[in-house]
Amino acid sequence: MTITQNLQDIKSELPEEVLLVAVSKTKPVEAIQEAYAAGQRVFGENKVQELETKYNELPKDIEWHMIGHLQTNKVKYIAPFVHLIHAVDSMKLLKMINKEALKSNRTINCLLQFHIADESTKFGLSIEEAQELLTSEAYEQLQNINIVGVMGMATFTDDQQQVRNEFTNLKRYFTELKTSVFANKADFKEISMGMSGDYPIAIEEGSTMIRVGSNIFGSR
C-alpha cells in the first residue's frame, strides 16, 4: 500500500466533520511530500526541532500541529508558524505560548490536554484543574492564545470498552467546559482524540480530530 492509497482509504471512511491530522513524526520529508501531493495539508509532529526543520523544508500552506508534550523553553521555535498546539496542560505553558505569540504578533490556537488514561506516564489536566485554570485572573490576561477545544490519549490497551469509556469522559469534559466557560465561544468545538489503533471508537464517541500516523505512513 502506498501513502496515497492509505490516505484515500482513511478519508473515504471519515465523517465530513472529522479532521485528519497526519502524524509525520520520524518520517522523512519525502513521505510528507507524497502525502501532500495526495492532498493532505494537516500534519502533526511531537518534537519541536523536527517540526521546525520540516516547516522550513516543506510548502508553506501546510497546517502544522504540535501534538507532543511541549516544554516551555521550546515554544519560541514554533510560535511564529504553528497552527494548533494540542497538548497544553499547565498555566505555565499557556503563559509562555501567550508571550511568544505576542512576539510573533499572532494568536495561537490551543487545546487543553486531559488525563483520561490509566497510565501515569501520560500528561494532562483533571476537569477540576481545567475549571480552576480557566476561571483564574491569570488566564483572563492572556490575549494571544485561543483555546478551541480539548485533547486526550486513551490507555494503550486491547480493552476496547476501557478505551471507549475514556473517550466518553473526554467528551463529557468538553461538554462541561462548553457549558460552564465557553458557552458564547463558537470556535470552542474541537475534540482531538483517536489514533491509528482506536480512531473508529473515538469518532463514535464524538472526536472532531484524529491523529493518525502508522495507518498512513506505515509502522516506524
Image (cartoon, helix red, strand yellow):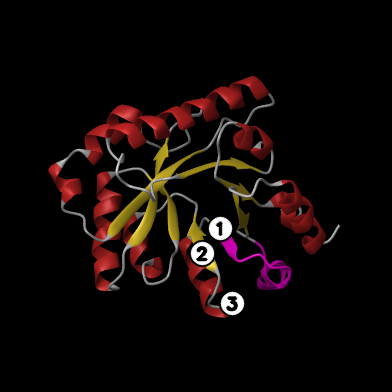
Q: Is residue 55 visible?
A: yes
Category of crowding for the residue at label 1, using alpha-carbon neighbours closer than 10 angstroms: few (below 14), some (14–19), many (at least 20) = many
- Quadrant location of the N terminus in the rendered image: bottom right
Given residues 59 and 56, the one toward you in this image is 59
164 left or right of 46 in image: right
Residue type, mark 2 in image: Trp
- Magenta stretch in the rendered image: 27-44
User: Which disc is residue 44 wearing?
Assistant: 1
User: Which disc is residue 58 wearing?
Assistant: 3
Residue type, mark 1 in image: Gly
User: Which disc is residue 156 wearing?
Assistant: none
Inter-mark Cα distance, 2 to 3: 11 Å
93 left or right of 204 in image: left
Residue type, mark 3 in image: Leu
Q: Is residue 120 visible?
A: no
* SS state under label 1: strand
Query: Which is more N-terminal, label 3 or label 2?
Result: 3
Q: Is residue 118 magenta?
A: no
Given residues 124 and 194, the one toward you in this image is 194
**Hey, which quadrant is residue 15 in on the image?**
top right
* SS state under label 2: strand
Instruction: Give residue 118's position: percent from left, percent from top.
Output: 51, 25
The residue where tag 2 is placed is: 64
Q: Does 125 sit above or below residue 28?
A: above
Residue in the image at 64% along x and 20% along y: 161
**Cβ atoms under marks 2 and 1 closer than 8 Å:** yes
Instruction: Give residue 10's position: percent from left, percent from top.
Output: 74, 50
Q: Does 209 sit above or below residue 135?
A: below
Residue in the image at 37% along x and 62% along y: 74
Instruction: Give residue 109's position: percent from left, percent from top.
Output: 38, 57
Residue in the image at 74% along x and 46% along y: 13
Instruction: Give residue 64's position: percent from left, percent from top.
Output: 51, 64
